[in-house]
Every structure is written in C-alpha cells, then in structure tokens.
Amino acid sequence: MITQHLNIQMIRKEIGTSFLVLAMLFMTTFSAFAGHGVEDEGEKAKFNAGEVIMHHVMDNHEIHIGPLHIPMPIILYSKEKGLEMFSSSKLSHGEPYNGYVMEHEKIYFVGESGEVARDEAGHIHAEKPLDLSITKTVFGMFLTIGIMLIIFVSIARAYKKREGMAPKGMQSVFEPLILFVKDEIAKPSIGKKYEKFLPFLLTIFFFIWIGNMLGLIPFLGGFNVTGNIAVALVMALFTFVLTILNGNKDYWMHILWTPGVPWWLKFPIPLMFVIEFIGFISKPVVLTLRLFANITAGHIIILSFVSLIFIFNNLYGAGGGYGVSILSVAFSIFMFAIELLVAFLQAYVFTLLSALYFGSAVEEHDHAH
C-alpha cells in the first residue's frame, strides 16, 4: 500500500512537471513570435495579435526556433534577371535587394532602382517573379518526409531481420498503427482489392499525422504543413486522380447513366448526371477544406489564448498580463491536448474518406438481379 501511494505521488509529480515544462516552452516560443506583432507607438509598444497569429499560420520565408530566426533560401526566376538565389534575410526588413522587394511574404520585382510603385489601395504594383523558394512549409514537408523514411526504412529492416518474431523497438511502436490502417480502414472500405491502395493510404496517413504533430511542437518552428491549403489540395488531388484511374465500368455508369432511377431524371434533362457530377467533383474539395480548416483553426485558437496575455499587458499593464496568464496558459494546454487528438483524427478521416472513394471506384455490382 505504501509503495502504491508513493508511485501515485510520483506519477502526479511527473505530470505536473511535464505540464509546467510544456507551458514554459510554449510561452518562451510565443514570446519570440510576438516580436513580429509589436508596433512602435512612442513610449509604449502595441501588440498586434492578428499579425502574430497570421505570421505563424501562413507560410513564410524564415523559421523561428525559440528566439532564433533562421532565414530560408529564396529562389526566383524572372524574365529580366533569370534564375537567382539568395538568403531571405536580404529582404526581411522590407528593403529592396537586387531589384526585389518582399511584403507580406510575397516577392515583387521592382527593378534596379528599388522604387516601389503602389496603387490607390496601397498594394505594390509590380511584376511577381516565379517563386521557387524553400519556405517554412516546404522545409516542413521535407522534414516530415525525412522522418517517414527513417521510420519505414527502420521498420522494413526489422521485419527482414526478425521475420516471424515479436516486434521490437520502433517496429513495436508503429506496427499497431500500420495494422490499424490495414485492418480498420483499407480492408472494410475497399474490399478484396485493398492491397493495391494500401501503400498510398499508409503514406497519406503517416504524412498527415507526422505533419500535424510537428505543427504542435512550438519551439521546433511551428510548422503548419497540413494547414496549408495548397498541400491539402495536392493530397486531395492525388486521391481524386487515383479514384478516376481505378474506376471500373459500374462506377462510371453510376455517374453517367444512374441505374435504378426513372428515365425522365436522365433524359432529356440529365438531372441525375448533374447531381452525380457535382458529388464527383466535390470529393477533393471536401478533403481539402476539412483538413485545412480543422488544422488551421486549432493553431489559431491556441495562439489566440496566448495572445490574451500580451493584449491585457498592453491594456492594463504587467498585472493584467500576469492575471490573465493563469487562465490563458491553462486553456492553451487544454487545447494543445485536444489538438493531439485532432492530429490523429484528421489523418484518420482523410485516409478513411480516400479509402471509401477507392472502394466505390472498384466495387463490383451484381448484375444478376
């Protein structure tokens, strides 16, 4: 009984310490981010919560690891100057460099004079070069792919060396997830042809899940890979193209000439075709928006709670900032815990919907009845 009581106390102490460390790391990192939203207004600086939050959520040309700002390589191609590459630190202060200027993470070619022409709305009126830069999101994708390669190469080697033996090490950690995707997603949703799509489903599941987890480590750069609508759209288009390429005769017949409905719904006004076609093209849109919106919203909510500390500090001084920090940090940690679940759920939902689309494309109907 005494030993059990001591163990419970030790567990509670470890949990408390973990939450404290997490709160300190989160606050330290956000304090570094907060510097981007401070505008000089005489004696007192004004904190711009919207700018800080959007700077974190949107893609940009530098990575923040705590107080460190790591510039990323900018790669541009323009008709006037051809292909050029230089550090993003050259454009980080809004000053023209080598004929280019950057505003709100968009790069414009303004010419060698460096004069920035603006329209009536204050927007820069200049040509945009082809931007092939390695941004924070691109680096986050490379990092996610690198982690996946390390994991899967290690697991593949373990399966070869320990064939027929119990899993061990990294293999034992990820084998339940692999079997989960295989037995709970691929098999029930696709059927007997599931093995053809299993590599893609495993890849998409782990890419989204690992990318989501990287985005929840604030002191590692705060990557928002899956919260980028372009990344989500490309993954959805992969699913869409694979569905089209693997669609059988029954699948296309259901879309073009829906069986089992009155003829007047198909001719002369093809009402059923219009309905089926809208459902057909909406699939990648649904996949994209669900992933993008859920991941981005989670980041915004967490950052909004932490922003309250700096807002109250500006309005009511240090006392107001310290006072609201207790609730702010508590809610931020609670949302962080929820986001850990959401990170997995979004990977699961995207993979499940992709499997369902594949299943509907390869399903064979019984024409005997």
Image (spheres, rainbow, N blue to C red):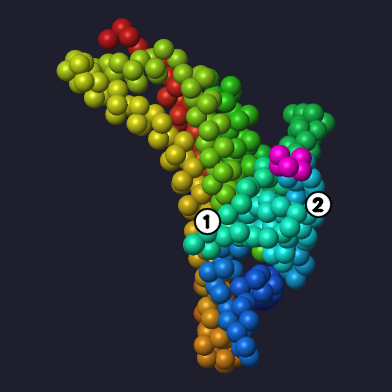
Q: CA distance from mark 1 to mark 2?
A: 30 Å
Q: Residue furthest right?
A: 161
Residue type pointed to by label 2:
Phe
Query: Residue 114 appears at what percent x and percent y?
Result: 72, 59
Q: Main secondary structure of the magenta part?
A: loop
Q: Which residue is mark 2?
A: 86
**Residue 233 forms part of the magenta stretch:** no
Work out whether 348 lies above or below 302.
above
Q: Which of the two labelled residues, at mark 1 and mark 2, occupies the earlier sequence position?
A: 2
Image coordinates of residue 42 in percent, x first then y, are 62, 88
Q: Is residue 275 above or below residue 329?
A: above
Q: Quadrant of the N terminus?
A: bottom right
In the displayed structure image, the side of residue 133 where residue 314 appears, left or right: left
Q: Around disc 2, counting alpha carbons within 10 Å, would you say few (fewer than 14), some (14 to 19), or many (20 or more)?
A: some
Q: Nearer the viewer, residue 13 or 343?
A: 343
Q: Element under label 2?
A: strand
Q: Name the side, left or right, on which 158 lies relative to 5.
A: right
Up-down: is 139 above or below 255? below
Q: Nearer the viewer, residue 293 or 229?
A: 229
